[in-house]
Amino acid sequence: MPVADLATRVVGQAKASLRRHERLRGGVVAAKDAAWQVRVALGTARHGAVVVEDEYGITLLVPADQRDRLRSLMRRPGDRPAFQLMDRMLGEGDVVLDVGANLGVYSVHAQRHVGESGQVFAFEAVPATADRLTQTLALNRATDVQVVRAAVTETAGSALMHVFDDPACGWNSLGSHPMYGYDGAAVRPSATVEVPAITLDDFAAEHHLDRVALCKVDVEGFERHVFSGARGLLAEHRIDVLCFEISEDALVGEGGTPAEVFDALDTHGYLTYRHEESDDTLVGPIDPTAEQRRLATEPARPYVANYFSTATPTLLLPPTALV
């Protein structure tokens, strides 16, 4: 019997056997389906956008040109202290302000805690980034989050945002200075866009916000401008907790110092604590001048540190220890 005929006969017998054995046939079909799914996923990862879920269970759409960022998007240890704080302190009906929302992961996580009776406002000035923020909210069924397409600063009106090409859109800011990648290469903004500018004091008055449980601020070095525009809220201690980052490279564009950022809160009676990554504790309350000196001698350059400020330190306890 020719080899070709023999092969055809063997295949036919195998198919007949599969038809007679339902469980075996189901296993083969399932295996084929799994293999097909893997091929589709690999093709998508190579040539198109891919949908992933990060360590917090938040779904993200990652464009093809950002596939090399998959790991950093899915695992973000720097966000854990703030996410753990949200898990502890946020409840039904709370109000959260996400200033500099970027892709919206903080907004999604906050919305899960405050529920339908709460309010989450996500502020994102750059139109393209705000579009991706809206996309993230839709993917996570967090459409109750209210997107505010404006820069938050110290004076209402308009502002000029300096825009970086993806995947560096997280560096968009009011500053025109370059930022630096892990390889030390300078990355410069590629465009500018004029956007509306608002203050948190005005926004709170317009939306009748008597109390804000959490205000996260990530505006690439322009944090004290946000705080200056919230001086009324801060003076009356109507924001329970603020979380923000101090980054050496980002502060260059604003032209200020870490101490000036801390002082903008300290003057209203807010105590600031630094998150200590080595043992996952909050250290403080810090002295603004002493903390600036500590950052200046930080061996890791450029320095980056996460901070939490509150007029009621017990809000940060427990299980995080204040030392």
Image (cartoon, rainbow, N blue to C red):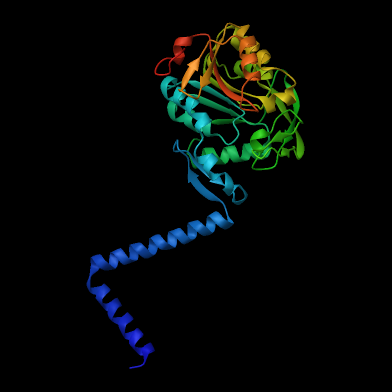
| Snapshot quadrant of residue 264 | top right
Q: Is residue 118 above or below residue 16?
A: above
Residue at the spot 46% in from the left edge and 15% down from the top edge: 316
**96 or 10, which is in the foreground?**
10
In-image side of 18 versus 244 (left or right)? left
| Snapshot quadrant of residue 224 | top right
Total numbered labels: 0
Residue 233 in the image, given as x and y percentages of width and height: 60, 11
Residue 117 in view in this figure: no
Residue 171 in the image, given as x and y percentages of width and height: 67, 33
Screen quadrant of the N terminus: bottom left
| Snapshot quadrant of residue 90 | top left
Residue at the spot 52% in from the left edge and 43% down from the top edge: 71
Residue 157 in the image, given as x and y percentages of width and height: 75, 23
Residue 84 in view in this figure: yes
Residue 282 in the image, given as x and y percentages of width and height: 49, 17
Residue at the spot 75% in from the left edge and 35% down from the top edge: 193
Residue at the spot 53% in from the left edge and 56% down from the top edge: 44
In-image side of 174 versus 110 (left or right)? right
**207 or 179, which is in the foreground?**
179
Check the image and name the residue furthest to the bottom. Answer: 1
